[in-house]
Image (cartoon, rainbow, N blue to C red):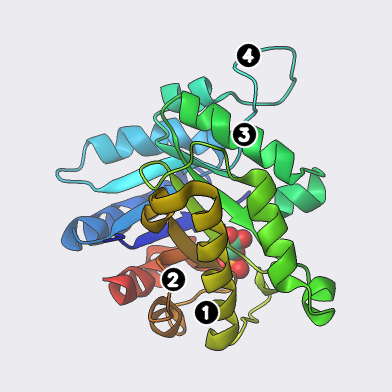
Amino acid sequence: MRRRLITGNWKMHGNLAALGELEAVARSAAAHPGIDVALALPATLIAPAVARLAGLAGAALAIGGQDVHPADSGAHTGCLSAAMLREAGARFTLVGHSERRADQHETSQDACAKAEAAHRHGLSVILCVGETEAERDAGRAARVVQAQIEKSVPEDANGTWLSLAYEPRWAIGTGRTPTMDEIAEVHAIARDKLRTLAGGAADAIRILYGGSVTGANAADILATANVDGALVGGASLTAAKLLPIIAAAA
Ligand code: PGA
């Protein structure tokens, strides 16, 4: 009942020339109508990407942002509101990515407020959670993820607009991934936690895995219980790397 979702995250990579990658990704998305495909782009590339895709017949690729400010407007130099992302053509945004938690000191409460703002303005949300290596080594991965979910999932969450991404921080950009059993364990715990927070609505909330997903490991990861898709960083930067992941999901 949950459609698989493959979302690329370009982070602070790419430029107008790199948008040439979009055509092959959009064609692949259109060729696999049973799954959803999305790309979270640098904010400056959202409008040009959407314009480019508008010229492609049957393009089924959603473009989104990587962060959003919780307020609708105000004196927040350098920030973007959900309405601004929407106007640029974004259909979703990431919130609470571990790089923002680490570099911009964002908390789970911040992520919650950002998710609510995005939802108010009609954006879907991919909310990211995940433990550090030290937390995993101390046997605290499950508890950390549970606490992040509890503090960051908005009250009215449901699967029509919210997805969760479990991204162990030590697996991001490192080429290291948890075992499939470890992924299954955290995803099951996340699913249970969502049920206690959102009741029956939780069953439609997709839980993506993120952290060093590639064409080589995507099939195994996507076959793991309660894994409803992937959040892909490095391997989303070129169509050549992303297409095998889309194919594995389909
Ligand atoms: P990675 O990044 O695929 O390069 O590990 C994942 C992410 O940060 O979303």
From mark 1 to mark 4, how far is it between C-alphas?
A: 40 Å
Point out which mark residue 184 bears.
1
Apparent side of residue 232 relative to residue 114 in the rendered image (left or right)? left
Residue neighbourhood size for the residue with mark 2, other residues' Cα within 10 Å, grouped as few (<14), some (14–19), many (≥20): many
Label 4 near ligand 1 (CB < 8 Å): no
Where is residue 24 drawn, in percent x and y? Answer: 29, 59
Rendered-image quarter of ligand 1: bottom right
Apparent side of residue 134 relative to residue 183 in the rendered image (left or right)? right
Question: Residue at left 49%, top 48%?
Answer: 198
Residue 25 in view of the camera: yes
Where is residue 147 drawn, in percent x and y? Answer: 71, 56
Q: Is residue 186 above or below residue 20?
A: below
Question: Which amino acid lies under the numbered mark 1 shown in the image of this protein?
Answer: Ala
From mark 3 to mark 1, how far is it between C-alphas?
A: 28 Å
What count of labels does the image hold? Answer: 4
Q: Is residue 4 above or below residue 100?
A: below
Where is residue 117 drawn, in percent x and y? Answer: 56, 27
Mark 2–mark 1 CB contact (< 8 Å): yes
Question: Residue at left 60%, top 54%?
Answer: 128
Label 3 near ligand 1 (CB < 8 Å): no
Instruction: Write down the residue under mark 3.
Output: 114
Query: Mark 3 or mark 2: which comes first in sequence?
Result: 3
| Residue 203 occupies quadrant | bottom left
Instruction: Write down the residue under mark 4.
Output: 73
Query: Mark 4 or mark 3: which comes first in sequence?
Result: 4
Label 2 near ligand 1 (CB < 8 Å): no
Instruction: Write down the residue under mark 2.
Output: 227
**Comparing labels 4 and 3, the label whose residue is closer to the camera:** 3
